[in-house]
Image (cartoon, rainbow, N blue to C red):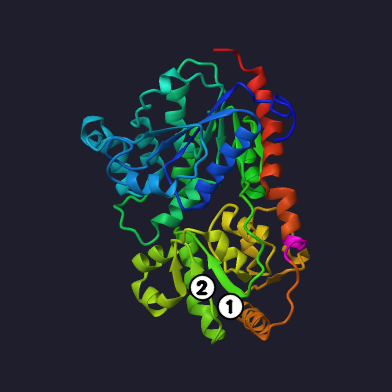
Amino acid sequence: MEGKAGEGLPLKGKTVAVVHAAWHSCGSYQVNVAQIKAYKALGARVISLAMMDDLQPPAPRGGRWASYLAASRDLPADRRFFTAPPRHGLVTSGLLIAGWWPLVHGDQATWLIELAKRAPPPKGLEGEHIDLIHANHYFTLPLAERVKRTRSVPIILETQDIQARQYVLRNQGGFFLPPHVGYDDMLRVEIDWTSRADLCIHLNEDEFVEFQKMLPGARHALVYPATDPAPLGEGRDIIIVASDNYGNFVSLRWFLNEVLPLATDVPVSIYGNIDKGVESRDRPLYEAHEALFKGRVADIGAVYAAAGCILLPTIEGHGLSIKAVEALSSGAPLIATPQAFRGMGVDPHGLSNVTLAHDAAEFAAALGETSARLRSGATLPASQGSDTRRLYDASFSPAAYRRALARHVIPLVETATPA
């Protein structure tokens, strides 16, 4: 932020602990990066506490830690801490009965809570004077509460969608023992822990409304997530960018099976680690379209800059899509299903550079027309002043996120009793 030291820095001299899952290459990771940047821009010193959501060797060596560290070098925290529930804890800590047994019946909500209960606060964290804890996903709250200890520190929970829905998706096709644990049972676990936060921040409009109904006595805020803007799309490539989650897999499978056969000879490139998800879940589908998959690339910005059209073939998933926000920021023309704009509180029909497709035939027709226009060498509309870029600047930019975060967070910090 500009100005003299201390001006516009309401959190100067404060330390914020951002507690989050040790995930990378996904929308949640980008949300965590944006949180840390926002708090630093407000003047705070920020520490990151990453928790692995699985039994792992002592952090941060061995197991999944190497890939996480390699992919999260850009996390801008002033100091980073790492933790994971130890592998030997499956038997010695009672996790076998408390967590694993529910998991084999499909109860991922309880499994994650029990893991977090057994993730030890890292060495060195006890010496940190923490003024605010910003936890992400309900299942990090057991760890956040242990970090808080007896200190009078407010805990914010950023829910990032109703997780029980994600677990139901994740359980599809899996093998679980009867009786199967369903959505309602997992939701009860999630709501019980969510109710413990001093403030619940929700990232999309639908989530905000639903949590208010389920927890009417809690404090709620709607704060749209931020991503750094992608470079303006000023090329002629047709692209899809997607991370590996089940909703993206279902959506891409629909695109490859139902849309692409109706749009022959249209060159499409698919970026992101969704290639691994398709390969593991449907190998014949992956092999049939292997040439389209470009994988995770070091410079995704260059991919957006070369885009003449971005495809959002979303038919599955919950919560606001970070990849859709990135696409908005590029200002490039979009072909999208209405569901790609879920939770944004905007009518996409009013966006002039968006073509909405309600079924595979409409999507394929729009794709064919766009491909012909791009190949013809016709002059393309400017991305800088496009409707989607203006929407991004107003609602999903780092500046918009920082303003909304400050409005809700600063009163909590100011009224907290000193430790």
Residue 261, position as x, y percentages in the image: 51, 84
**Badge 2 amino acid:** Ser
Is 384 within the magenta?
yes
Which region of the structure is painted magenta? 383-388
Q: Is residue 311 above or below residue 261?
A: above
Q: Which numbered circle lies on residue 360?
A: 1
Q: Is residue 123 magenta?
A: no
Assign the N terminus to one quadrant of the image: top right
Quadrant (top left/top right/bottom left/bottom right) for the C terminus: top right
Q: Are marks 1 and 2 in contact (CB under 8 Å)?
A: no
Residue 252 is situated, as x and y percent measured from the top left of the image, at 49, 69
Q: Is residue 215 above or below residue 378?
A: above
Residue 269 circle label? 2
Quadrant in the rendering for residue 357: bottom right
Q: Position of residue 280 (x, y in %)?
A: 34, 65
Asked if residue 346 can be seen in this view, the reply is no
- The numbered disc on residue 22 is none
Direction from residue 326 to residue 181 in the image, left or right: left
Q: Is residue 213 left or right of residue 268?
A: right
Q: Amino acid at mark 1?
A: Ala
